[in-house]
Image (cartoon, helix red, strand yellow):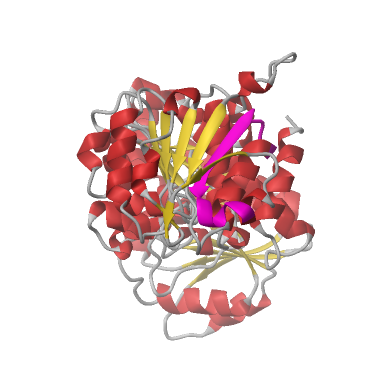
Amino acid sequence: MYVADQKTMQLLDHFTMEQLGLPGAVLMENAGNAVVQAILKDYPKNTSVLVLSGYGNNGGDGFVIARRLIDFGYDVLLCFIGNEAKLKGDARIHFQVYKNRQLPFYHFNAEENDIFTYIQQADVIIDAMLGTGVSGEVRFPFNQIIEAVNDSKKDVISVDIPSGLNSDTGKAASTTIKATKTITFAMPKMGFFVGDGPTVIGKWEVADISVPDSVVETLQLKLPKLLDEATAISSLPQRIKHGHKGAFGHCLVIGGCKHYVGAPVYTAKAAFHSGIGLVTLAIPEKIYPLVAGTCHESLFIPLSDSNGFINWKAIETIDFSKYTTIAFGPGLGRELDGDAIIRTLLDQLTTQTLIIDADGLYFLKNHLKQLQHYKGDIILTPHPGEMATLTGKSVAEIEANRLETAKNFAATYGAYLLLKGHRPIIATPTSELWINPYGNDALGKGGSGDVLTGLIASLVSQHQNPLKAMLCASFYHAIAAEELGRNSSNYGVTPMDIIHYIPILFGRK
């Protein structure tokens, strides 16, 4: 499924109307009917529905919704907010149909308080006020109406997008509808997954209004794609029925220090629980007894250390040729010469996939140009703070422009990038973008990122290409957190819980 911004949706709508010949009034009728079908499914006919409509195309959808719900026997009041003289095009057509039928109608008057009474009396409120054209703050009277709707605590269904939310950036105005559900048309909007979007859209679904996905290929558009279960399942590497441990790859994990003993353990265990054949942990000698006692599955290379941190010269003694994948950084710490380790890895590795995470990314910032010359695949998994370090930008700048930041960085340095955070972004060296719409705050614990690194390393080691490995790992990592949270609570889900749940999820395919 593609994800679209406002400009793209306008282009797709225009093509559908002008080139395919489907009138805009028909698209609007389809959109309104799609929302009606959702209401029919979720609410009984004795439900009292208030439809709040503005004077743009979003309001036009509202006119259709109100009319069709009345046809199905619902108790409906259409409240029009705005100047009738500003109605034009398809919205005016549907407004006139509604008025011609003399259906229940209220025209908002700023000098009266009736609308606030209607908000309190309704069981369900349909938000068809502002649509995707919003940028900046919401003006009077919409701001007061939105505040009243949010204060009412009623179920709110937003049409296409919650009023007040920027459909491109996900920035919410100070008064923005907090929807129970958002029913959007043709494609999910970019703003659903960035900025404030995830906090205000509620549950969301995409309705087909006869704008075909094939138009994207026809117009040769490069749009982000949304990660889903089917993509994740198809990205799981196939097991060789009579395979041995050597058939399923061997990952070398370089990391750990006296402060972060558990990080490389999480990475190794996540790899084992997702199908890898062998994992070797290259860790400081000082923590070897602790790690070896908790990670019996692994092989070990105890490295000489300086006060509990890896001595970079010890890296030169490793024979890298036996490993399919190298994961560098989990629990590494910063009190060592990480620059020298990065140089050694990029000089000595040939075509192995190199995954860099955590403090490995901190040291990578001085060696980004070297990535462009590496012959193997490189996967980077920064959180926003680490991305800020890599780019020299602030965390606020990263979060305000997650998609473009990830896309430009991956293309510039020829790396595969997974930008972590709420709704992870995956970018490829060829500027392909994916958004993971899953996950929750159960992942907001130390060690979760180390688990994700282990999953990616495992899937790549099992001969999966980097993009598919990242999609699969990111999806199941997020789904594990969601399901575990539902089974108990988000408070108590630990990285080890996720590790143990991964084989269960893999077994469902």
Picture quarter containing residue 124?
A: bottom right
Percent of width and height locating residue 264: 55, 49
Residue appearing at x 60%, y 43% in the figure: 268
Residue appearing at x 52%, y 29% in the figure: 460
> Does residue 58 appear left or right of residue 464 in this picture?
left
Region rendered in magenta = 273-289
Q: Is residue 286 magenta?
A: yes
Residue appearing at x 67%, y 23% in the figure: 245
Closer to us: 183 or 104: 183
Question: Considering only vertical position in the picture, is 115 above or below 441?
Answer: below
Closer to us: 444 or 64: 444
Picture quarter containing residue 153?
A: bottom right
Percent of width and height locating residue 449: 52, 52
Question: Considering only vertical position in the picture, is 398 above or below 244?
Answer: below
Query: Does residue 3 appear in this view?
Result: yes
> Does residue 270 appear left or right of residue 254 in this picture?
right
Percent of width and height locating residue 58: 44, 54
Residue appearing at x 23%, y 43% in the figure: 367
Q: Is residue 18 magenta?
A: no
Percent of width and height locating residue 494: 67, 59
> Does residue 403 appear left or right of residue 78 in this picture?
left
